[in-house]
Amino acid sequence: MKNERYIGQEIADHHITKLMIETGIDKFLA
């Protein structure tokens, strides 16, 4: 179960990174 949670976090991090790239890091930091 702990491994599943870790994988879920990995996927979430990937989505956040994708959003940052798509939205633009400048917008994210602003």
Image (cartoon, rainbow, N blue to C red):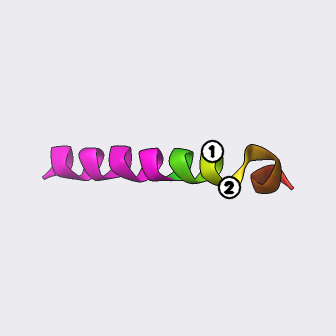
Q: Position of residue 10 (x, y in %)?
A: 36, 43
The structure residue drawn at horizontal position 29% and vertical position 52%, both measured from the top left corner, is 8
Query: Residue flagged by tag 1: what amino acid is it?
Result: Ile
Q: Which residue is mark 2?
A: 23
Please name whichever residue, 18 or 10, is drawn nearer the observer in this view of the structure: 18
Picture quarter with the C terminus: bottom right
Please name whichever residue, 8 or 3, is drawn nearer the observer in this view of the structure: 8
Q: Decide: marks 2, 1 in contact (CB < 8 A)?
A: yes
Name the quadrant containing residue 19.
bottom right
Q: Kindly give the residue lying farthest to the left in the view shown.
A: 1
The structure residue drawn at horizontal position 25% and vertical position 52%, both measured from the top left corner, is 5
Magenta region, residue range: 1-15
Q: Position of residue 20 (x, y in %)?
A: 63, 49
Query: Residue flagged by tag 2: what amino acid is it?
Result: Thr
Say if the magenta span includes residue 9: yes
Q: Which mark is residue 4?
A: none
Q: Which residue is mark 1?
A: 21
Say if the magenta span includes residue 6: yes
Please tell me whether the stretch drawn in magenta is mainly helix, strand or loop. helix
Please name whichever residue, 13 or 5, is drawn nearer the observer in this view of the structure: 13
Q: Is residue 13 left or right of residue 19?
A: left
Per the model, the C-alpha gap separating discs 2 and 1 is 6 Å
Name the quadrant containing residue 17.
top right
Circle 1 sits in a helix, a strand or a loop, which is it? helix
